Image (cartoon, coloured by chain):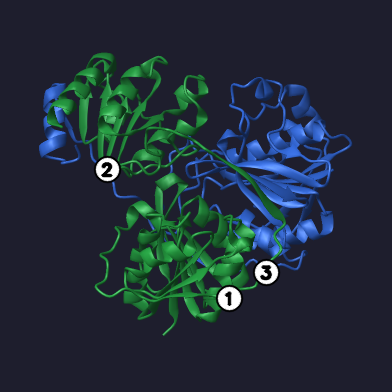
Chain colours: A blue, B green
């Protein structure tokens, strides 16, 4: 089977995020970049599905600046087979990303598309669902699994998504109040949540190998997709700042203040 | 004036509370646009839960029937989008719960609408505030399409008052689509504690617990709180992944957040600094968590938390 996985280049969550003085965006100088953590879980799942259903292929796709080749390379170093980079330096909203991905999918015809449930920069949690609708496909968002991350299945690197023999897959979804299991008819969009798996680290030999794997480059224009945003970012501001409060000498004072001052207990 | 359509969320005839937050957001949009609010509720038991929503004085459409029994994104988004089209909706508003996040974008795609997700505040007729970079920045976004879909963070919009006169409840006839997904089962997580992202109080433990969460759980029980954990705790395998509060875990904004033995890495702060009142308990007086805490206590959590649990019990 052919599995397509999306990887977004995002600011490292360990980096300090500061808003630009002109409120146009965040300061990008001195910020580290990496692959969106949810996307790494998607890559891991794709690799497990591939390796238990040979012959299969895992293609990683990124929509972003030229520098996003580094994040595709990190997916290839984890073990993906080849990459596609759709280059666009300016901001692309989730709708634009979904329409670019639709063009790629129309050409690649994968059996399954795995995406992180959201990118930790704009925190939108939208592109996968839009893409499913544009394709007319089924979707399973927030993929998780019944087995815990300490389970023997996880230790054995078994996929959490269970392929059926009849062109379907069962996906356990993390929803409010529990896990819902859906059977999706393939091809389908699956967006992944934190508890699906623990992604592998790229080994040194695989990092070396990844350097030789092909990355096809193209632009939204070449795909015939207009990425003018439907949702524009007008202004970016720092969040309301919290100031350090008071230190209390003991538990009694703390509880008293929470009760009579903050009125939260 | 265009209609503002609130898409309700319900299970087995009971309206989910988050729907009322979506209604509150719709009321704020109505103040900017002059639009009229209507509702739609889809699924098994929707007729009954629609009455609950209509009690707030808005007309509510109901979509029921076997095709809509389970909350599948394909069928529910199709129903909501069709009602939105018939009602001439200019805005569609849904709470950004798992359900709203699942169906909202599909509704937007069907309507050719731009979508503002997980909105914190209504800034104008077509402008909305939302958190990015896990709350490290607040963006004002403008939806440029004629029809807009807005999903709202429920904790940011207080439920409105019921109206004196209830609205009408009418069945809507919509075509049943053939979904490519099938409901298999629902495994409810039975926990005596409230859900992490919905709890009024969250007690979280970090590396300082050394993996012993008993004091955290005991205090959580007394406060009817959810239990959270820092990434260090989850990475160490001491607590499951789904308890992780932080940018790559759950983002919470309770009335009271108690951080015990948590140093306060950026990753963690991003997931909890929207909390109304923050209490930090840590042995290390220099821990960064104290810089965001309203009340800081330099103490050993193994002594402080049981003492706190006792003191809270006395208040109750």
Q: From the image, which quarter does the N terminus of chain B lie in?
A: bottom left
Label 3 vs label 2: CA separation? 44 Å
Q: Is residue A141 left or right of residue B60?
A: right
Q: Residues within 10 Å of mark 2 (few under 14, many from 20)?
A: some
Real-space Cα separation, disc 3 to disc 1, in angstroms: 36 Å
Q: Are marks 3 and 2 in contact (CB under 8 Å)?
A: no
Q: What residue appears at the point 26 percent right and 44 percent down from the top-left corner?
A: B276
Name the subunit of mark 3.
A
x, y percent for residue B125: 39, 74
Q: Where's residue A175, x and y in %? A: 52, 45
Tell me if mark 3 has few (under 14), some (14-19) or many (20+) residues whose alpha carbon lies within 10 angstroms of its own.
Answer: few
Q: Position of residue B316 (x, y in %)?
A: 15, 32
Question: Taking B194 as reference, is A106 above or below it?
Answer: below
Asked whether, in this view, residue B163 is left or right of residue A13, the answer is: left
* A242 or B122: nearer the viewer: B122
Q: Is residue B90 above or below residue A71?
A: below
Q: Eyeballing the image, is B308 above or below B293? A: above
- The reply to whether dot 3 and dot 1 touch (C-beta < 8 Å) is no
Mark 1 highlights which residue? B173
Circle on res. B152 = none
Per the image, label 3 sits on a secondary structure element best described as: loop
* N-terminal label among 1 and 2: 1
Write the residue at 64% across / 36% down. A41
Which residue lies under the disc numbered 2? B255
Q: Residue at x 70, y 38 (%)?
A: A161
Q: Chain for mark 1?
A: B
Residue A129 in sight here:
yes
Asked if both marks, 3 and 2, belong to the same chain, the answer given is no
- Disc 1 or disc 2, which is closer to the eye? 1
Mark 1 crowd level (few <14, some 14–19, many ≥20, 10 Å Cα)? few
């Amino acid at each position: 089977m052919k599995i397509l996985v999306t990887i977004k280049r995002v600011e490292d969550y360990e980096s300090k995020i500061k808003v630009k003085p002109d409120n146009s965006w965040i300061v990008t100088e001195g910020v580290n970049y990496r692959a969106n953590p949810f996307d790494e879980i998607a890559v891991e799942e794709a690799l497990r599905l591939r390796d238990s259903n040979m012959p299969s292929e895992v293609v990683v796709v990124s929509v972003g600046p030229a520098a996003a080749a580094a994040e595709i390379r990190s997916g290839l170093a984890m073990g993906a087979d080849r990459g596609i980079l759709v280059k666009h330096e300016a901001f692309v909203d989730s709708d634009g990303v979904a329409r670019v991905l639709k063009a790629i999918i129309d050409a690649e015809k994968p059996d399954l598309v795995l995406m992180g449930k959201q990118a930790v920069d704009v925190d939108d949690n939208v592109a996968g669902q839009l893409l499913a609708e544009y394709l007319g496909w089924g979707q399973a968002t927030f993929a998780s699994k019944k087995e815990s991350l300490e389970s023997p299945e996880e230790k054995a690197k078994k996929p959490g998504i269970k392929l059926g023999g009849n062109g379907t897959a069962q996906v356990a979804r993390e929803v409010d109040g529990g896990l819902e299991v859906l059977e999706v008819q393939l091809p389908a969009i699956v967006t992944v949540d934190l508890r699906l798996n623990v992604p592998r680290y790229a080994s040194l030999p695989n990092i070396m190998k990844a350097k030789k794997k092909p990355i096809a480059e193209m632009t939204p224009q070449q795909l015939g997709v207009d990425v003018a945003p439907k949702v524009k970012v007008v202004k970016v501001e720092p969040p309301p700042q919290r100031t350090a409060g008071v230190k209390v000498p003991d538990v009694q004072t703390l509880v008293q203040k929470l009760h009579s001052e903050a009125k939260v207990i | 004036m265009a209609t503002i359509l609130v898409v309700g969320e319900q299970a087995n005839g009971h309206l989910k509370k988050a729907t009322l937050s979506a209604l509150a957001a719709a009321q704020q949009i109505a103040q900017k646009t002059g639009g009229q609010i209507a509702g739609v509720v889809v699924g098994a038991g929707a007729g009954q839960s629609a009455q609950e929503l209509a009690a707030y004085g808005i007309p509510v459409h109901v979509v029921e029937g076997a095709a809509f029994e389970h909350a599948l994104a394909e069928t529910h988004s199709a129903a909501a989008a069709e009602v939105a089209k018939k009602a001439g909706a200019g805005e569609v508003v849904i709470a950004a719960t798992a359900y709203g996040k699942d169906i909202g974008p599909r509704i937007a795609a069907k309507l050719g609408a731009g979508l503002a997700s997980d909105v914190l505040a209504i800034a104008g007729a077509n402008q909305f505030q939302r958190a990015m970079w896990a709350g490290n920045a607040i963006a004002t976004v403008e939806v440029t399409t004629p029809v807009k879909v807005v999903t709202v963070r429920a904790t940011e919009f207080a439920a409105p008052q019921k109206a004196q006169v209830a609205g009408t409840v009418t069945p809507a006839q919509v075509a049943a689509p053939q979904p490519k997904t099938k409901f298999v089962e629902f495994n409810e997580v039975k926990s005596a504690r409230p859900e992490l992202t919905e709890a009024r109080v969250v007690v979280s433990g970090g590396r300082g617990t050394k993996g012993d969460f008993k004091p955290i759980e005991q205090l959580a029980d007394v406060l009817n709180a959810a239990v959270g954990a820092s990434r260090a705790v989850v990475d160490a395998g001491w607590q499951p992944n789904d308890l992780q509060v932080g940018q790559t875990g759950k983002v919470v904004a309770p009335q009271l957040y108690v951080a015990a033995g948590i140093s306060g890495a950026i990753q963690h702060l991003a997931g909890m600094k929207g909390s109304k009142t923050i209490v930090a308990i840590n042995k290390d007086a220099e821990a960064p968590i104290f810089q965001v805490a309203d009340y800081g206590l330099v103490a050993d959590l193994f002594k402080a938390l049981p003492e706190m649990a006792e003191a809270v019990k006395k208040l109750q």
